Amino acid sequence: MREAPTVLLSGFADESANRKTAVEQFAAFAALGLQYYSIRFIDVGSGVKNIMKLSKEEIQQVQQWQKEYGLRVSSIGSPIGKVKLQDIDDGTTNVFIPFKKYLAEDVRHACQVAHMFETRLIRGFSFYPPKGSDPRQYLSQAVDQLGQIADLCHKEELIFGLEVEANLVGQNGYLLADIYKQLRHPALVLVFDAANILCQGYTPAETFEQYQAMKPGIGWMHVKDYRYRPQATKGGHIDEEALKHFVPVHLGDSGYDRILRDFALTIPPLERKLKRRGVPGVFLELEPHLKGGGQFGGFSGPDGMGVALRSLCRLLDYLDIRYHLRDFDDIRAARGF
């Protein structure tokens, strides 16, 4: 009889906090029973900052608090790759940074932050082509730059996870799969997110097809669902700030039941592969956006994160995929019993 596969549950902790303070984030995640979190935006007493903007002293303070709440970082929720490929005014607010400077400063700093938080995983993106353009025209440039990012991560013994998201070169599963195939880099994996595909007007069936295209390269998953809305065009520019149909997995149209049933067969070999790279297992990271989402983050609140987690756990129970939430044994261990 096949042994049930096991995943590690995590999430973007800033989504659970009304004011994004560290204590709010960690208290919510500890109460939900989570032991891992992805760090993205956080307030340690001097206002909300992206993880990339924290000082060394602020990072040390976060580390102290996360230890108090029994948490570890699953991945760095960095914005690496959310900059323009070309220095062209295309009507967006996206910035352009010369790539050599970007690699030497921003990407290298993301690696340093990952080391400080003792995680091997950095979430990132595939760069913005000019608004309204065909992303395939910029595929070769994106592949070249992502390859250099992967090279740096490999030297640092880290893994760069490329997330599928609207408006980027890798805006759908087929394009990301193409990037992965062209690079075949040991430090590059793909991060699947069904809602980021469905919200672009792709059907649930097309979303599953894009999952299958990405599957050989998937390193971990984000769990965020959406109510399907037909659109005149698919894959065109999306106003991310206007998206408002995010729902927990039991109410969404992305088909996470079908996706995770299929992915369950991939989990054991992927887990072995990741553990060889120093990653503790296969992460499912909640990023529900239940109270709103946008280009650089979303919000669910402590109640919304709880709703999203329980919805996911019910699905995992149904599919016989194992996971762990804190229990009394964890409490006893923390108390030294």
Image (cartoon, grey):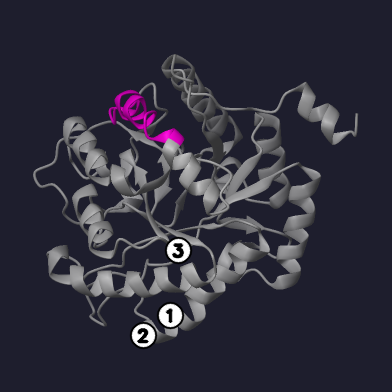
Residue 264 sits inside the magenta stretch:
yes
- Against 186, residue 235 (above or below) is above
Provide residue 186's location: percent of width, then percent of height. Answer: 40, 60
Q: Is residue 287 visible?
A: no
- Residue 246 left/right relative to 137: right
The foreground one among 92 and 107 is 107
The foreground one among 16 and 186 is 186
**Which is more N-terminal, label 3 or label 1?**
3
Residue that appears at 67% across and 37% down: 28
Q: Which residue is mark 2?
A: 98
Q: Which mark is residue 102?
A: 1
- Residue 240 left/right relative to 273: left
Element at label 2: loop
Q: Which residue is mark 3?
A: 79
Per the rendered image, the range of residues in magenta is 252-268
The foreground one among 259 and 229 is 259
State if disc 1 and disc 2 touch (CB < 8 Å): yes
